[in-house]
Image: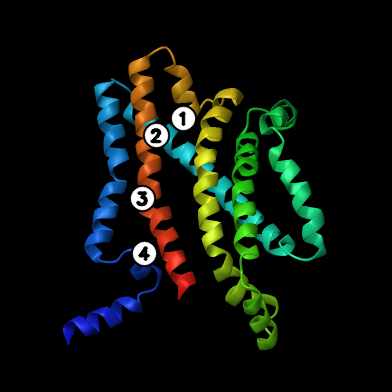
Amino acid sequence: MRSTHHSHHVRHMGIGAGVYKTWRHLALTLFIVFLPFLFFLLFSRAANLATGELFTNVFISVARLFFAYVIAAALGWLIAVNVYRGKVSSVALPIFDVLQSFPTFALLPIVTLAWGKSEKTIIFFLVITIIWPIFFTVVSQLKLLKSEWQEVVQISGLSGIAYLKYYLWPASLPGLITGSIIGLGEGWEALVATEIIVNHPVGLGSFFQSNSQNPYITGLGIFGLLLLIFCVNKLIWLPLLDWSHQRSEE
């Protein structure tokens, strides 16, 4: 009887229960996410680096990427749900396909001239790097929807906010999460490269640039960055991806 009550309780716990099967699983995952911070702490001590400066560089770069991701995800999703079908799709999608193929860093001199070596320049390049995988995976996800579902929606009379909330949002969620994983993967690369090119004094780009002559520190720094990316994916994106697919199958 207790196990039945427990399973009933878990089913009503929302996303947390859908993503993390047990509390032990959640606790283990939370432990994993602290590994990169422990590594950076030990790394700073072993390499005789200023711990506070190293953590500041990591935090600033992660904050830039997070801020750019929020903008890119919101814009990418909103544009995708408005152009994925109908006549506008035949015009808009080829244009966006050309735009996403344009070499992003070709714009860097113009943007730097306008905004200088600033946060705006870095955020701008991160947004246009992350937005395209999100946009195209959401479009692909929505195009795969069965025509019968759209007919049901039309019969039920869903429109406006209700249409977005109860149909487009859950239907597009797997594509949004998949696009986020791909976009953030490209975003990490663009983040460090842009920080180095712009020569911003704070961030991972500054760290790698100032230690470029030391292969030991550079190698461990790259390993720490990869560990951080792995833990973020393990904690957030992969569980969310599994949860979204399970939800779409129900």
Q: Is residue 78 visible?
A: yes
- What's the distance in space between the residues labelled 3 and 4, CA to CA? 11 Å
x, y percent for residue 239: 38, 58
Instruction: Decide if residue 250 is on the left or right side of residue 119.
Output: left
Label 1 or label 3, whichever comes before in sequence order: 1
* Quarter in which the N terminus is drawn: bottom left
Label 2: which residue? 225
Front position in the image: 50 or 107 = 107
Disc 2 to disc 3: CB gap under 8 Å: no
Front position in the image: 22 or 85 = 85
Label 1: which residue? 204
- Tell me the element at label 1: helix
x, y percent for residue 174: 52, 61
Label 1 or label 4, whichever comes before in sequence order: 4
- What's the distance in space between the residues labelled 1 and 3, CA to CA? 22 Å
Disc 2 to disc 1: CB gap under 8 Å: yes
Label 3 or label 4, whichever comes before in sequence order: 4
The residue carrying pointer 1 sits among few (fewer than 14), some (14 to 19) or many (20 or more) residues within 10 Å by Cα, namely many
Label 3: which residue? 234
- What's the distance in space between the residues labelled 1 and 4, CA to CA? 31 Å
Amino acid type, label 2: Leu
Residue at (48%, 31%) from the top-left corner? 203
x, y percent for residue 238: 40, 54
- What's the distance in space between the residues labelled 2 and 1, CA to CA? 9 Å
Disc 2 to disc 4: CB gap under 8 Å: no
Residue 101: quarter of image: top right
Q: Nearer the viewer, mark 2 or mark 1?
A: 2
